[in-house]
């Protein structure tokens, strides 16, 4: 079956000193190649949701949505001003400006292997309404588009965090994302908890040649602590509203033996151990 997917990203004019200055062009090119290879097998629409001042960075083959209007700076007074968009606003552009059956969001520093969309169509044919795909970490030996064939040949290493999300459009209006901004911790946790608990058939793809990131770091926070604290507060608001849907059986690794799944939850950056233990207690003993 041939599915229609809208892949939305958030390009921006990164400073020349940032690793995103070389990561974004590689992301763009890998999307272009993967889309071209998948033509005829899956219907892929690529959209860029960005602020007006960032539109020049968007390559011609990617369609621009209407400009983003709000940022995290409209939500709170920060000492250091960083104009970061809200994930709910980005996803809303995909929902309202495309009729695609599935919405795909990936971070702007996440690149695709050539067969990505083909493999995604196979996963969707299994009946999943939500999928999270883990990336590979690739050593920054090559950082130019001309080096892509060499990059594709690198073995890489797994990464536990989440940065590529796919979900059926029917889930969007159920999602509780509050005013979480991108580029700061807690976006991945908030996004993933929504998909864990609101979907009917969730799939976590932990390995394979799907996506990659140039850089071997496990965790990288570019934003000041005040933004970390802000997103943490928005995450807590979201989880409180999602509470009626939260069940430990929906979490990854819930099929493992109790001691093993607790360890896996505790080690995973997107599964808060306090929340997991609370849900496990609720399962066995009831109550809140």
Image: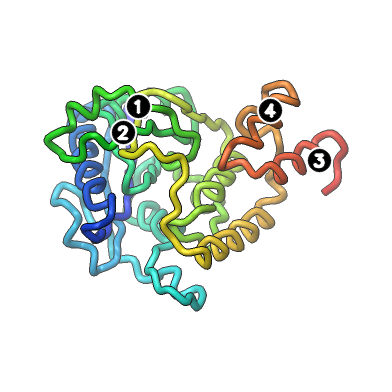
User: Residue 28 appears in which quarter of the rendering?
Assistant: top left
Query: Separation of disc 4 and disc 3 at Cα?
Result: 16 Å
User: Residue 209 appears in which quarter of the rendering?
Assistant: top left
Residue tagged by mark 1?
156
User: Which element type, helix, strand or loop, lies under badge 4?
Assistant: helix
Residue tagged by mark 3?
282
User: Which element type, helix, strand or loop, lies under badge 1?
Assistant: loop
Query: Separation of disc 4 and disc 1 at Cα?
Result: 26 Å
Q: Quadrant of the N terminus?
A: top left
Local crowd size for mark 2, using a 10 Å CA cut-off: few (<14), some (14–19), many (≥20): some
Query: Separation of disc 3 and disc 2 at Cα?
Result: 42 Å
Q: Nearer the viewer, mark 4 or mark 3?
A: 4
Tell me residue 165's x, y (percent): 44, 41
Q: Residue at x 46, y 58 (%)?
A: 88
Query: Separation of disc 2 and disc 4 at Cα?
Result: 30 Å
Q: Nearer the viewer, mark 2 or mark 1?
A: 2
User: Residue 36 appears in which quarter of the rendering?
Assistant: top left
Residue 139 tag number = 2
- CB atoms at circles 3 and 1 under 8 Å apart? no
| Earlier sequence position, callout 2 versus callout 4 | 2
Q: Is residue 84 above or below residue 143?
A: below
Tell me residue 45's x, y (percent): 26, 43
- CB atoms at circles 2 and 1 under 8 Å apart? yes
| Earlier sequence position, callout 3 versus callout 2 | 2
Local crowd size for mark 3, using a 10 Å CA cut-off: few (<14), some (14–19), many (≥20): some
């Amino acid at each position: 079956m041939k599915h229609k997917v809208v892949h939305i990203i958030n390009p921006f004019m990164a400073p020349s000193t940032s690793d995103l200055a070389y990561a974004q062009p590689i992301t763009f090119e890998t999307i272009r190649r993967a889309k071209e290879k998948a033509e005829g097998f899956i219907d892929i629409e690529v959209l860029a949701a960005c602020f007006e001042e960032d539109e020049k960075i968007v390559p011609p083959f990617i369609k621009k949505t209407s400009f983003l209007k709000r940022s995290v700076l409209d939500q709170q007074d920060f000492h250091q001003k960083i104009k970061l968009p809200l994930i709910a606003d980005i996803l809303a552009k995909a929902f309202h400006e495309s009729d695609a059956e599935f919405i795909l969001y990936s971070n702007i520093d996440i690149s695709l292997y050539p067969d990505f969309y083909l493999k995604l169509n196979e996963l969707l044919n299994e009946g999943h309404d939500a999928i999270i795909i883990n990336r590979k970490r690739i050593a920054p030996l090559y950082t130019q588009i001309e080096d892509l064939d060499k990059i594709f040949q690198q073995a890489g290493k797994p990464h536990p965090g989440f940065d590529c999300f796919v979900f059926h459009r029917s889930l969007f209006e159920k999602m509780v994302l509050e005013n979480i901004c991108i580029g700061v911790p807690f976006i991945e946790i908030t996004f993933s908890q929504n998909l864990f608990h609101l979907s009917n058939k969730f799939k976590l793809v932990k390995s394979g040649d799907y996506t990659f990131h140039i850089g071997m770091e496990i965790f990288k926070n570019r934003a000041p602590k005040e933004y970390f604290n802000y997103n943490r507060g928005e995450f807590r608001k979201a989880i409180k509203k999602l509470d009626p849907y939260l069940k430990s059986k929906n979490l990854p690794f819930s099929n493992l033996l109790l001691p093993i799944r607790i360890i896996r939850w505790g080690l995973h950056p997107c599964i808060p151990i306090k929340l997991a233990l609370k849900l496990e207690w609720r399962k066995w003993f009831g109550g809140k």
